[in-house]
Amino acid sequence: MGTVACRVLYAEPLPEDLQGIVGEELPEEWQLDVVPTRDREALLQLAGGADFLVAATTPIDREVLAAAPGLRHVQHQGVGYDNIDVPACRERGISVSLTPEGTTTGVAEHTFLLILALYKNLRRAEAQLRAGGWPVWELRSRSFELSGKTLGLIGFGRIGQAVARRAAPFEADVLYYDPFPPPPEVEQALGATSRTLDDLLREADIVSLHLPLSAQTRHIIGARELRLMKPSAILLNTARGPLVDEPALVHALTSGKIAGAGLDVFEQEPAAADNPLLGLENTVVTPHISAGTADAFRTKMRAVFANLRRVARGETPINQVPG
């Protein structure tokens, strides 16, 4: 096929400004199609002529693959690929790759956004101020400093390590749990100490999730794990919603088992309007935007099209999902 006249289908609706960023990275003579709506039929119709497919949250299943007879490669623009039927791609000889580039910084920064918003009672303080109040004293006994606290990271890969690196200026202690720990020199450089999962949950003031979603990690935080946490502890999830058993979390938050939660992801996305987590005073919630910056998107698109060029030249893509 060479490197010309390839068709790329972006499988998510995009606003015009982001389409412009994608277009800036598109090689000459390549064609870009962007699915205009979340309507399934629009995706299936446009998939028919695609050589490459770029996906974020859209399910890429057997129906989509059957509609794309010429598809060679699926490029996930992030790292959580639970929406892609990898075995079905493998059967068709379609490679699947991830795009870790551009994700790390935004997620690591967002982790601290959630921590500080919870520790400083940002929601309560802003709401009362906007309503005409001046809660200088009312929130003091429920507000805390990150300095001197113990930050427990469940998952110590690329993002977990980036969070640990940023914890040092806050003078926070770092514990981590990971079934595949890094080399000792990485642990030493980041000032992090390994723990079992149960010990981390018992010791940490802040528990932050940085794991991929798999059969093994689904509901890794459930009722049992929440009972192990301190009543003063907070839970953060910027990874994948199903890592946490949401009904168990709601019970822990409403019964005082833990003090609060900062959530960028949910078991069902978009989160339903009646999800009880959205109405709790001791939660800070955002709509899966931790990696959603213009800086990250530009970096991602640069990496996405670099990989698509590799495949077009007949080379093996990088960051390929094994199988």
Image (cartoon, rainbow, N blue to C red):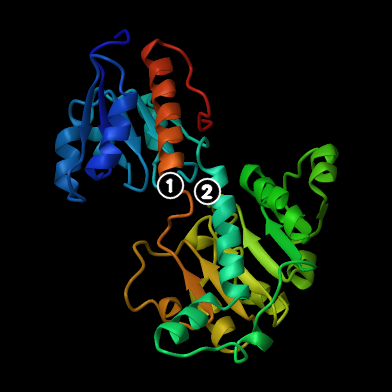
Whether residue 146 sits left or right of residue 247 in the image: it is: right
Front-most of 128 and 220? 128
Report the residue at 59% width, 82% height from top.
252
Q: Which mark is residue 293?
A: 1
Residue 316 placed where, x, y %?
48, 17
Give residue 203's quadrant in the image: bottom right
Residue 280 placed where, x, y %?
47, 82
Which residue is identified by label 2?
A: 106
Give residue 167's quadrant in the image: bottom right
Front-most of 120 and 184? 120
Front-most of 236 and 116? 116
Say what amino acid the circle numbered 2 marks: Gly
Q: Are marks 2 and 1 in contact (CB under 8 Å)?
A: yes
Say what amino acid the circle numbered 1 marks: Thr
Secondary structure type for disc 1: loop
Position of residue 316 relative to residue 231, above or below, is above
Secondary structure type for disc 2: helix
Give residue 256's quadrant in the image: bottom right
Q: Of callouts 2 and 1, which one flags the residue occurring earlier in the amino acid sequence? A: 2
Q: Residue furthest top?
A: 2
Q: Quadrant of the N terminus?
A: top left
